[in-house]
Amino acid sequence: MFNLLKELEKNKISLPIEYLGPNDYATFWDIKTVLENTEFFQNYLTSKSLQNIDSINDYLDYLYLKKLAAFKEMVSMIRDEAGKQIVKDISCNAELKLKNVKKENIVRFINKGYREIFKEENHKHHLPQITLDLMVPFQNGITDEVFEYVAKNYNYLLLARYSDFQKRFEKDHSLFDLLFQKKNLEEMRELRFNCVFPIFITIWNGNNESLKNIIKPIIENIISDTENLVKQETYVESRDILVTDQIFRQVYDLIKQIKHPKAVSYTHLTLPTNSEV
């Protein structure tokens, strides 16, 4: 079935689905693409009629229309008067097409088509990230099934947007628990310390006891795993010491910020020097 993404690929036109805003240089390249292929985009908008979002093709077209409509804020930054008018006309036309699509249509399709949206093949187009952007304002209408699927299979995406979905996690503690499978140091490294640790600190210093009870054993595992890592007797290369030192410092910073009793004993842990390797 027809959708703009397929037509762009067929015509060898590069226009990502994601709109990065007026402060990102990539947006100016997108405007350039539209101006270089004006007839293509005008024909698309003339032929396109979007009433409902019933398929992934409709959804992709909706996202592209949203992007083209957003170009309206770029018009004043275009120097060429003819170019200004072209982008203005295209963005206004896209905006008109979007008026037929109701919020309920978007929510309904995300709830129905989430598995297709989050397919691996769609990650190269940033479709999951774009969908999460849509889910933020509509999250009360998004089903538990959708959130649970993302938490189990793409936990890093939700963790990266923790502040946007914080209220949801505070109400649904089991959803937050689903974000962590192994609950150990290795998993936290995979999820990135600089993403996970600030979340732990926020929860620890907050008032939600249920979330605290979820992260407490995880933190204890992190501490234990770090101690075992530091105390191991053999390091194959000097680089191993540097990696371990970095882990140690980040974990120490975490337990210091949450005022964990182990923070004091951590100051006495030492790594072997390069000469000992």
Image (cartoon, grey):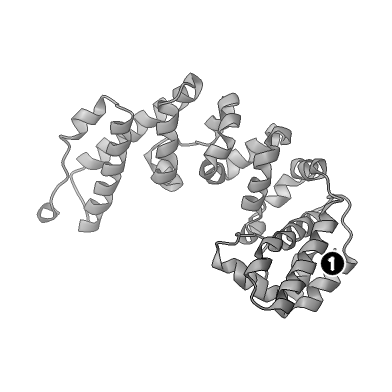
Please tell me which residue lies in front, 182 or 203. 203
Left or right position of 30 against 252: right
Query: Where the N terminus falls, by quadrant?
Result: bottom right
**Residue sitting at x 28%, y 32%:** 256
Secondary structure of the residue carrying numbered label 1: helix
**Residue 28 percent location from the top left of the image:** 61, 70
The answer to whether 149 is drawn above or below residue 29 in the figure is above
Query: Is residue 13 among what the camera can see?
Result: no
Query: Is residue 71 among what the camera can see?
Result: yes
Please tell me which residue lies in front, 210 or 75. 75
**Residue sitting at x 49%, y 22%:** 208
Quadrant of residue 149 in the image?
top right
Quadrant of residue 57 in the image?
bottom right
**Residue sitting at x 76%, y 46%:** 113
Please identify the residue farthest to the left as the structure is shown: 275
**Residue 8 percent location from the top left of the image:** 74, 72
Please tell me which residue lies in front, 265 or 240. 265
Q: Amino acid at mark 1?
A: Leu
Q: Mark 1 — residue?
A: 45
**Residue 79 percent location from the top left of the image:** 64, 76
Left or right position of 231 against 218: left
Left or right position of 24 against 136: left
Please tell me which residue lies in front, 58 or 93. 93
Q: What is the number of callouts on the image?
A: 1
**Residue 263 percent location from the top left of the image:** 24, 30
How crowded pointer 1 is (Cα within 10 Å; few <14, some 14-19, many 20+) is rated as: some
Left or right position of 218 against 57: left
Query: Where the C terminus falls, by quadrant?
Result: bottom left
